[in-house]
């Protein structure tokens, strides 16, 4: 071992996000400008609006992700050079499918992004399921 | 390319496989020095395949992506600071680095380990 780093995911590739949706069985609705949510902000002190988004922007997006069996949708909003995912977590079916704070969707995105780049650099890739996540081993 | 060396208790159990393995190349090219073979331990249907290897440790970049979205990148087989450069493309690709910890191998220069002492007194 030489070093260990922890990374906080930022979504920058729309193509990899689409592939992540395919991996999880979601529908990516490109250029859909609105996404389904409750419609009204409830208790903003306890559930604050995400950073980089204003209240009048809620419900509007650049693209949307539809999760089967869920009532609400995930909005994909472009801010500068990255994409923010916005959704209404009151839908428990949606929350269960994408994980706490969208963890499973972010995981799928990170897998696709890593595999895409590793293939470009001619790495051999091994994907393994581990108890609390997924492990990708890149060898060259 | 030579033929694979194999042994099996029942030759009839050997599957019909078209496998080309480079085994003991020095038999075909006398200019190559004999190197000890590396046994990979692959067993298939009772046949043991023995393949020559370089004996060098494999360099790996291990990316662990947890179910909550957290990413942990680990490098193995690298000595010295080169591991940081090798894994940098992944960090730029995936997001912001929030923490980093260096292992003893990071301080290794060639085969020598550099010991670092902390001034505890005076």
Image (spheres, coloured by chain):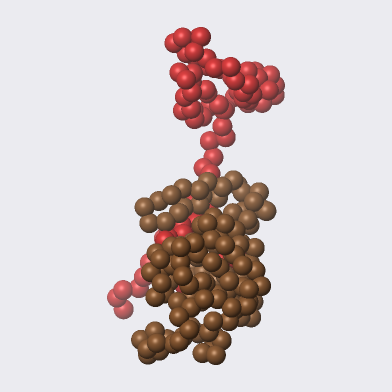
Chain colours: A brown, B red
Is A64 displayed left or right of B114 in the figure?
right
Q: Residue at x 46, y 57 (%)?
A: B64
Q: Residue at x 63, y 56 (%)?
A: A116
**Is residue B58 in view from this perspective?**
yes
Rendered view: A123 above or below A20: above
**Is residue B87 in view from this perspective?**
no
Rendered-image quadrant of the N terminus of chain B: top right
Rendered view: A122 above or below A49: above
Give B60 or B90, whichever is nearer the viewer.
B90
Q: Residue at x 61, y 62 (%)?
A: A18
Q: Residue furthest left?
A: B121
Give B109 or A33, whichever is nearer the viewer.
A33
Rendered location of residue B69, percent (x, y): 45, 65
Rendered view: A104 above or below B31: below
Q: Residue at x 64, y 51 (%)?
A: A119
In this rendering, the count of numbered labels is: 0
Rendered-image quadrant of the C terminus of chain B: bottom left
């Amino acid at each position: 071992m030489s070093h260990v780093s922890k990374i906080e995911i930022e979504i920058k590739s729309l193509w990899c996000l689409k592939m992540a949706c395919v991996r999880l069985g979601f529908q990516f609705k490109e250029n859909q400008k609105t996404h389904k949510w409750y419609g009204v902000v409830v208790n903003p002190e306890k559930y604050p609006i995400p950073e980089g988004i204003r209240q009048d922007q809620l419900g509007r997006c650049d693209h949307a992700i539809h999760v089967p069996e869920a009532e609400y949708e995930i909005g994909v909003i472009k801010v500068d050079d990255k994409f923010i995912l916005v959704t209404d977590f009151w839908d428990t079916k949606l929350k269960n499918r994408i994980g706490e704070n969208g963890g499973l969707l972010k995981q799928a995105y990170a897998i696709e992004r890593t595999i895409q780049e590793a293939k470009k650099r001619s790495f051999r890739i091994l994907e393994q399921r581990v108890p609390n996540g997924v492990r990708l081993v890149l060898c060259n | 390319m030579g033929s694979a060396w194999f042994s099996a208790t029942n030759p009839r159990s050997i599957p019909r496989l078209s496998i080309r393995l480079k085994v003991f190349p020095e038999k075909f090219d006398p200019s190559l020095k004999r190197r000890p073979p590396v046994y990979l331990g692959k067993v298939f249907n009772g046949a043991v395949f023995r393949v020559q290897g370089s004996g060098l440790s494999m360099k790996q970049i291990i990316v662990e992506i947890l179910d909550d979205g957290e990413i942990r990148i680990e490098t193995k087989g690298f000595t010295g600071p080169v591991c940081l450069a090798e894994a940098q493309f992944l960090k730029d690709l995936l997001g912001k680095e929030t923490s980093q910890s260096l292992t003893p191998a990071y301080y290794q220069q060639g085969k020598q380990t550099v010991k670092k002492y902390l001034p505890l007194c005076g």
